[in-house]
Amino acid sequence: EEQVVAPVLTEASSGWEHKLAIYGWAASFDGTLTYSLPGEDDVRSDGGVIDNLDGVFMAAYEVRKDKFSFLTDVIYLGMSGGETIAEDLGRGRLETAVTEEFDAWVLSFYGGYNVIDTGSATLDIIAGMRYFSLDVEASISFPNNSLPTIPLSPSFEVYDALIGVKGSYNINENWYVPYIFDIGAGDTDLTWQAQASIGYRFDWGDVLATYRYLHYEKDDLRLVEDFDLYGPKVGVVFHF
């Protein structure tokens, strides 16, 4: 009697692998901010404006099947601060006090294709886009002048195409080093990011210690001419 054997689908050959990473980030900010004052040239602030990161959320979700992968990365920053800017305007010195509250979102989306997999090392080529939005509640006052306080609520959003690499290297069965680098342009002149981690695998998931650097620049972007966000972060990764 002939027997019919049904094919068995294994996770290795047909399953989707999912990873969710949630991070805490001790981020620092550098940047050049430009404020337009009535009747005068733009006032430039070279960094130092942001005193506090009031709220940070960062997470990444990755799904992979065979050689293909898709990755979504989300950053939210709530920031506040202030400074006094002094400008020589030809007919005198103008001092302006600037206070701000920032809400920033950075969303990155990638598709990837694996080109190297030796068992201990992997390398994917990735391509995608990044979205950056910044909403500001700001006010400018003139301590040594009779001009009234000027409220500002500028905002902008930009989209950039990206290309890069992503991979990892296994030191042993527990320790490994994941990394990612991308670079691109579009609405901005240049954006790039780099991050590298050291990770340890547990039965329930992984723990990562990471350093990340994110850069934007554009000469004629309103309010922000360049934007650097960097610092160490610690995260947990869940596999399912």
Image: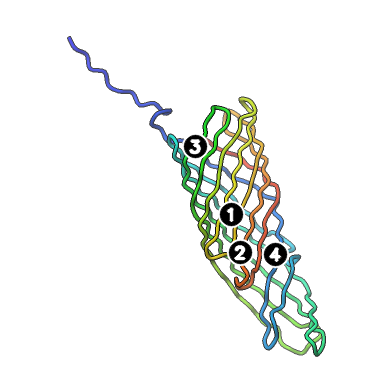
Tell me: 239 left or right of 228.
left
Q: Give the number of the mark in front: 2 or 3.
A: 3
Residue marked by disc 2: 103
In-front residue for pair 227/101: 227
**Alpha carbon separation for disc pair 2 and 4:** 15 Å
Q: Which residue lies furthest to the left in this view?
A: 1
Q: In this view, does 33 lie above or below 144?
A: above
Amino acid type, residue under disc 2 in the picture: Asp
- Name the residue located 57 percent from the left edge and 53 percent from the top edge: 183
Q: Which residue lies furthest to the top in this view?
A: 1
| Between discs 2 and 3, the one toward the N terminus | 2
| Between discs 2 and 4, the one toward the N terminus | 4
Query: Where does residue 138 sit, x and y in percent of width and height?
Result: 66, 74
**Alpha carbon separation for disc pair 1 and 4:** 17 Å
Q: Dot 2: what SS?
A: strand
Residue marked by disc 1: 75
Q: Do the residues labelled 2 and 3 touch (CB within 8 Å)?
A: no
* Residue 31: image tag: 4
In-front residue for pair 161/24: 161
